[in-house]
Image: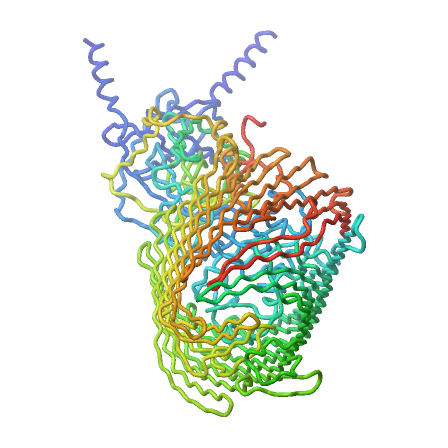
């Protein structure tokens, strides 16, 4: 029995021994040279499975433990013809090494197989940042979020730049509300719904121009996270003053971004000096110079008279005693796939107070006197603006767009002035009304060729009424002794109609050709009427102080532009040909003129290598005189200034040269950016000024050869050891021109300015980070006398980020003004602390501004006729308790 | 006497290994879609035992239109690249981090490919089969052809019984697509020999390489933040999430 079991077991083993085989093989070529790393496919035909092996360095391979009876072996190796062999293990001795000889394959040289279609990669123009990698939910507004994205720079006014270039627009999910007026959005929209920031390079405002027009414009597109779509969300900020009475800020944003319709409503009420809107002008008139279909963008009415002020060096909010209300309602509708309607409207009420004391010392050409002014100004404005954009996508290659704008504003500026200790009151009432209609048809008739046809009509009118309750001009009108006040009424109106046909042709090799043919017609009507009054009675309307000017300019033009790329060079050449028809009517005197001129320009960009990029350009321009250059009689432009134009036609020629060199990149340790700008105005409008203690008469005169030069270099070096970046900023500006005083000879005025700045900014990971810097500015104006001064501004910013919930910031500034005997040092300190009670929902904060309570600020400036010392009133210290609630 | 004959015969029969100088060049179009979509061409040159893969080389014109680049990618010009050697089972990666060149050395990883036997496809005229495998945190689906019988593929993907022509990861963040296959002249040999340069450049392991790469990215971001102008406030600098590129998970993390 036991033997039978043993027999069975041995038979069993015998069978398995026989069925489990290990086969060794060797692969070689016909010269007996082994072939390493050949691929062997071992197919078990019965089971229909295959395994893959490869031969080792010596051309050997082993098939381990196979149970099959027949195997098909397929051997292939690079450079050899593949071989198939059927192994029947009943016939082969598996103990012997199997030999496979492969035949060399004659490979045809230059056998190239190319994929026919290269996928179009537009993505290279898009850089996407998923915000979660750069932020930590502590950012309140979009502006604060964008400050975290590498490559984006936000300056103190909120201007967003990528590298050196300001962005064109800030879009949300592909839709834009504000164009260059994006600050309304970035300063107010909450940051938390934003999931992705896209930087779109080579951006085209017109989708049909993408890839054809040479655009180095950049736009940002914010993508929202899905939760935020289709629900109402927004935030409320309410700040109220502690200790000081009635200081407040109330802001709220309400948004709903659905797929079809988007709504955005925002409001801001404050009296803490914050300018809610940023730059209103850019909402009304987005500037798109040199962009296709931008005809008429540079046409607007400028007023001769403006009562407004600026504070040099300081942020506007420090001296902006305001009371502002802003409400804006915006919507984007997509009723059908082809139509998009965008509406924008806002109302702005603003009342701003301003206060300053000024001492002017005039000392030139044997004239000398001193004036003292104690000036208090109140500006009141009420502006309404509405805009409707309609885009109709006729087909994939055709598009029709129309834009209609309407705006009306009422301005009331009054000042209480102590001029040389005598009280003087000014009052300026103005209105501005604007109607603007643009229509554009774009046809992309071939893949890389586009034709645009644009028409534009603008009507803008600004009537003004100005009164001064004193008569300071006895020396001008000696015979009128009873006059005790003056008034001037003026109306400045413009009508513009233009049509432009533009052809863009992007060639195969990347070169771009452009042709434009257009006609622009502009009619300006300026009428001013200056009257001398005794109380309410009109005593006189003096002869040389009334204007009735009609100025018609018709510009027929042909513009050519070509862009060539040769290796690392980019050439841009432009040739603009203009045929003008000018007609001037000044107080019933008519004149005609038909000037013809050609303006060439050449630009050269050279990318030496990845670290060195040079851009340069040269151009020759001719400018035709504008309405404010050509009127013939005097106009009152301030309580003690009159000005008058040339009374005739003029074309001004200028040559211009720019050069820019960038060394390195933003993320390099060493990064330098140098800029040189030289401009020579062959013809230039200067002034002949008649100086008198109580008034000055400025008359426009034409002079030759005004030059200006500006050189600036910005050097950055990152010190790894202290994790800080050192920035060195050096600049030099020089400009010279000629003018005359009291009808004397032309005298030369040279103005030079040097500046040197040093900054050190840290990027530590810990709690504290600092930013310290100092800047010296030296200004000198040379005429027959020299006036100069040196100012210094230093600052130290400290930021403390304790944890997720609490952060604090200190900002201090120190100003030192040269040439002031007393009060020439100022120290200002601001403080800001935030505590997030509930993350992304409720935040409390405290802000203190001007903690050292500096009440005023004095500085020194020079001009070509003398010097002045000005003292500005500052918003006194206040502490605000803030609260923000998000929903 | 017999022994001598045996030895002689043995010597004669052991003639040596073919000097395979058939070099093939394959151009891939690579698309990375992480935080920033990024596309470029890469070149793979191989013979039957060594391959060499580098970024940025191609015959197609590279210059894009009017680009003003704000942040440059450290462009790896032909000299830097990956080298896989089947003989030694070593993998070399010559790269720049910051300003220095390093030679990263590691053992080739055996990727556990699963070949789909029923799959069939044609790419560029070659019959292909599909396979899937997980490598360093990503699941790749690839198409390979046994008509080009080498174990290589783009970047670090290799180990299949044929050249990998297309590879895509499951998250759609990494894609390699073949564009061109060219057989080069026999006489041309390439300097594949990174191991020879071990004396020239510091040799680091994969782990050290990864650590250095993270340091470099953190430094770059630091340098940008430090250049921001006055008034630009960084309210909270988050722990910059470790830069992950194609490789999401490493062996030492398992």
Q: In the rendered image of this protein, does residue B121 appear above or below residue B247? A: below
* Residue A257 picture quarter: bottom right
- The colour scheme is rainbow
Note whether B200 is above or below A445 in the view shown: above
**At which x and y percent is residue A547?**
54, 85
A268 or B201, nearer to the observer = A268
Q: Position of residue A301 (x, y in %)?
A: 56, 76
Outermost residue on the top side: it is A2
Residue A254, position as x, y percentages in the image: 74, 60
How many marks the image carries: the answer is 0
User: Quick one: A838 or A360, which is closer to the camera?
Assistant: A360
Q: Is residue B239 visible?
A: yes
Position of residue A401 in the picture relative to residue A601 (left or right): right
Q: Does A690 sit above or below residue B238? A: below
Q: Quadrant of the N terminus of chain A?
A: top right
- Asked whether, in this view, residue B187 is left or right of residue A299, the answer is left
The percent position of residue A692, horizontal first and vertical second, equals: 53, 72
Please state which of residues B225 and A263 is positioned toward the viewer in this rendering. Answer: B225
Residue in the foreground of this view, choosing between A231 and A816 = A816
* Residue A408 seen anywhere in this rendered image of the structure: no
């Amino acid at each position: 029995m036991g033997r039978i079991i043993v027999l069975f077991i041995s038979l069993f083993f015998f069978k398995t021994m026989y069925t489990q085989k290990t086969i060794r093989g060797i692969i070689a070529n016909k010269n007996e040279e082994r072939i390493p790393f050949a691929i062997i496919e071992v197919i078990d035909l019965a089971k229909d499975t295959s395994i893959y092996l490869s031969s080792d360095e010596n051309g050997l391979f082993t098939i381990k433990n196979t149970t099959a009876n027949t195997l098909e072996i397929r051997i292939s190796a690079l450079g050899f013809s593949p071989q198939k062999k059927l192994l029947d293990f009943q016939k082969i001795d598996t103990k012997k090494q199997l030999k496979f000889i492969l035949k060399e394959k004659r490979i045809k040289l230059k056998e190239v197989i190319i994929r026919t279609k290269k996928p179009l990669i537009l993505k290279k123009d898009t850089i996407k940042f998923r915000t979660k990698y750069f932020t930590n939910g502590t950012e309140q507004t979009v502006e604060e979020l964008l400050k975290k994205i590498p490559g984006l720079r936000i300056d103190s006014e909120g201007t967003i730049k990528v590298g050196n270039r300001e962005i064109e627009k800030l879009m949300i999910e592909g839709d834009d509300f504000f164009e260059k007026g994006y600050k309304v959005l970035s300063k107010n929209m909450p940051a938390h719904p934003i999931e992705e920031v896209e930087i779109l390079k080579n951006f085209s405002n017109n989708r049909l121009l993408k890839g054809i027009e040479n655009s180095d414009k950049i736009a940002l597109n914010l993508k929202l996270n899905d939760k935020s779509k289709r629900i109402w969300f927004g935030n409320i900020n309410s700040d109220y003053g502690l200790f000081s009475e009635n200081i407040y800020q109330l802001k709220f944003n309400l948004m709903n971004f659905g797929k079809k319709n988007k709504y955005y409503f925002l409001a801001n009420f404050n009296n803490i000096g914050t300018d809610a809107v940023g730059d209103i002008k850019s909402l009304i008139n987005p500037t798109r110079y040199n962009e296709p279909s931008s005809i008429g963008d540079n046409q607007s009415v400028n007023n001769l008279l403006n009562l407004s002020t600026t504070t040099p060096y300081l942020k506007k909010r420090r001296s902006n005693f305001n009371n502002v209300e802003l409400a804006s309602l915006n919507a984007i509708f997509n009723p059908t796939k082809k139509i998009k309607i965008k509406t924008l409207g806002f109302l702005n009420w603003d009342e701003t107070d301003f206060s300053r004391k000024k001492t002017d010392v005039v000392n030139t050409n044997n004239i000398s006197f001193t004036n003292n002014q104690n000036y208090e100004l109140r500006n009141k404005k009420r502006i309404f603006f509405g805009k409707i954009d309609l885009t109709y996508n006729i087909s994939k290659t055709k598009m029709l767009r129309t834009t209609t704008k309407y705006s009306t504003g009422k301005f009331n500026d009054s000042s209480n002035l102590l001029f040389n200790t005598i009280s003087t009151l000014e009052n300026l009432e103005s209105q501005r009304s604007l109607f603007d209609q643009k229509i554009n048809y774009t046809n992309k008739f071939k893949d890389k060729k586009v034709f645009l046809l644009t028409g534009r009509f603008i009507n803008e009118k600004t009537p003004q009424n100005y009164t001064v309750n004193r008569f300071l001009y006895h020396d001008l009108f000696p015979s009128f002794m009873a006059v005790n006040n003056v008034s001037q009424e003026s109306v400045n109106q413009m009508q513009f109609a233009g049509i432009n046909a533009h052809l863009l042709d992007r060639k195969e090799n990347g070169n771009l050709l452009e042709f434009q043919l257009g006609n622009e017609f502009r009619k300006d009507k300026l009428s001013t009427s200056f009257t001398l009054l005794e109380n309410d009675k009109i005593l006189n309307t003096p002869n040389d102080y009334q204007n009735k000017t009609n100025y018609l300019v018709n510009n027929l033009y042909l513009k050519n532009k070509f862009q060539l790329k040769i290796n690392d060079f980019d050439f841009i050449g432009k040739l603009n040909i203009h045929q003008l028809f000018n007609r001037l009517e000044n107080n019933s005197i008519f004149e005609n003129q038909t000037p013809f001129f050609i303006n060439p320009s050449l630009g050269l960009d050279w990318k030496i290598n990845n670290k060195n990029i040079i851009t340069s350009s040269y151009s020759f321009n001719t400018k035709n005189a504008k309405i404010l250059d050509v009127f013939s009689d005097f106009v009152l432009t301030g309580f003690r200034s009159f000005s008058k134009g040339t009374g005739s036609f003029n074309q001004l020629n200028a040559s211009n040269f720019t050069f820019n060199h960038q060394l390195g990149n933003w993320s390099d340790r060493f990064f330098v950016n140098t800029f040189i700008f030289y401009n020579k105005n062959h013809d230039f409008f200067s002034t002949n000024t008649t100086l008198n203690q109580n008034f000055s008469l400025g008359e426009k005169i034409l002079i030759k050869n005004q030059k200006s030069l500006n050189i600036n270099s910005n050097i950055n070096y990152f010190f790894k050891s202290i994790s800080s970046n050192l920035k060195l900023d050096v600049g030099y500006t020089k400009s010279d021109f000629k003018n005359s005083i009291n009808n004397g000879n032309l005298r030369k005025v040279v103005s030079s300015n040097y500046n040197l700045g040093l900054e050190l900014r840290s990027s530590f990971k810990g709690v504290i980070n600092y930013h310290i810097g100092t800047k010296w500015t030296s200004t000198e104006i040379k005429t027959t006398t020299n006036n100069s001064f040196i100012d210094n501004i230093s600052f130290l910013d400290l930021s403390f980020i304790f944890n997720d919930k609490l952060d604090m910031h200190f900002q201090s500034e120190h100003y030192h003004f040269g040439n002031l005997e007393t009060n020439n040092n100022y120290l200002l300190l601001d403080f800001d602390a935030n505590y997030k009670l509930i993350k992304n929902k409720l935040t409390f904060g405290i802000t203190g501004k001007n903690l050292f309570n500096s009440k005023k600020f004095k500085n020194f400036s020079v001009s070509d006729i003398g010097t002045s010392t000005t003292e500005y009133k500052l918003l006194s210290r206040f502490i605000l308790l803030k609260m923000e609630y998000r929903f | 006497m017999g022994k001598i004959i045996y030895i002689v015969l043995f010597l004669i029969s052991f003639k040596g290994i073919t000097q395979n100088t058939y070099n093939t060049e394959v151009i891939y179009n690579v698309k990375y879609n992480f935080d920033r979509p990024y596309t470029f061409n890469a070149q793979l040159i191989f013979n039957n035992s060594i391959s060499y893969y580098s970024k940025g080389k191609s015959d197609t014109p590279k210059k894009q239109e009017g680009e003003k680049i704000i942040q440059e990618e450290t462009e790896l010009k032909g000299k830097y690249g990956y080298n896989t050697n089947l003989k030694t089972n070593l993998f070399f990666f010559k790269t720049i981090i910051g300003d220095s060149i390093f030679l990263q050395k590691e053992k080739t990883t055996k990727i556990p490919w699963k070949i789909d036997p029923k799959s069939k496809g044609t790419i560029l005229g070659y019959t292909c089969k599909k396979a899937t495998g997980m490598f360093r945190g990503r699941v790749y689906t690839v198409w390979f052809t046994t008509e080009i019988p080498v174990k290589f593929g783009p970047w670090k993907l290799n180990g299949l019984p044929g050249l990998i022509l297309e590879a895509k990861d499951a998250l759609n963040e990494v894609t390699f697509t073949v564009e061109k296959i060219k057989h080069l002249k026999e006489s041309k040999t390439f300097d594949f020999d990174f191991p020879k340069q071990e004396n020239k450049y510091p040799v680091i392991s994969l782990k050290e390489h990864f650590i250095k790469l993270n340091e470099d990215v953190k430094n770059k971001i630091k340098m940008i933040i430090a250049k921001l102008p006055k008034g630009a406030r960084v309210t909270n600098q988050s722990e910059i999430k470790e830069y992950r590129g194609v490789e999401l998970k490493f062996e030492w993390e398992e």
